[in-house]
Amino acid sequence: MKLLLVTALLFCFVNANCQQAANSIETSNIHIINGLKQSYSFGPANQLQQAFGKTKAIKEADEVRGGFGYTYKYKGLTVDFHEHDWDSATVSGTEYAVVLNNIPYKIGENISKLKNAFPLSFKHPEKRSANNSVVWIDITNKKKPIDAFIHISFDNKGSITEIWIGNNDS
């Protein structure tokens, strides 16, 4: 039994696709809000623009999946779509907050804010570089795991630097 456990742990360590233990959150409990408390919950591009205002889409061919990708950029927020389907969102500025289970998380806040809400994820951050680590939170839909994640990046001082929400194929 111990040999099996050691083998599994070793496999996990050398396999780049193996994730640390992480908490999960339902898709319905994830929102992005702006300073005016307008909210977006990963619907189509017209819902994004209704919430945060019109912006021109940047259209690029998607050579991996085929079709086209569309990127909508706001100050501190980038949202990507593949064809008409939402793909990912990146919050990088203080103009927006990501709301998880009714708790807003903003750039510049301390990562310890996650400790009570997502204890497993908080306990097992992934070191990305000498200056950057990431807390992973899995996303579920109707309590079933889906291939989507939240990555909350933070620096050596513990300050949140970026929040990425997206499908695994983003």
Image (tube, rainbow, N blue to C red):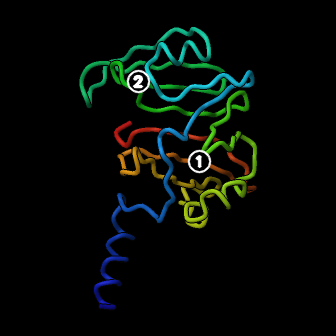
Residue beneath the point at 42% across and 61% down = 19
Q: Mark 1 or mark 2, which has the lower sequence index?
A: 2
Q: Amino acid at mark 1?
A: Ile
Residue 118: name its quadrant. Answer: bottom right
Looking at the image, which residue is at 41% across and 27% down? 86
* Residue 152 numbered tag: 1
Residue at (46%, 52%) from the top-left corner? 138
Look at mark 2 in the image and give the residue it sits on. Answer: 81
- Please state which of residues 30 and 78 is positioned toward the viewer in this rendering: 30
- In what quadrant of the picture does the C terminus appear? top left
- Dot 1 alpha-carbon crowd within 10 angstroms: few under 14, some 14 to 19, many 20 or more: many
Residue 62 falls left or right of residue 157: left
Q: Position of residue 57 (x, y in %)?
A: 47, 12
Q: How packed is label 2: few (under 14 Cα within 10 Å), some, or many (20 or more)?
A: many
Label 2 element class: strand
Residue drawn where x is 37% and y is 77% of the image = 9
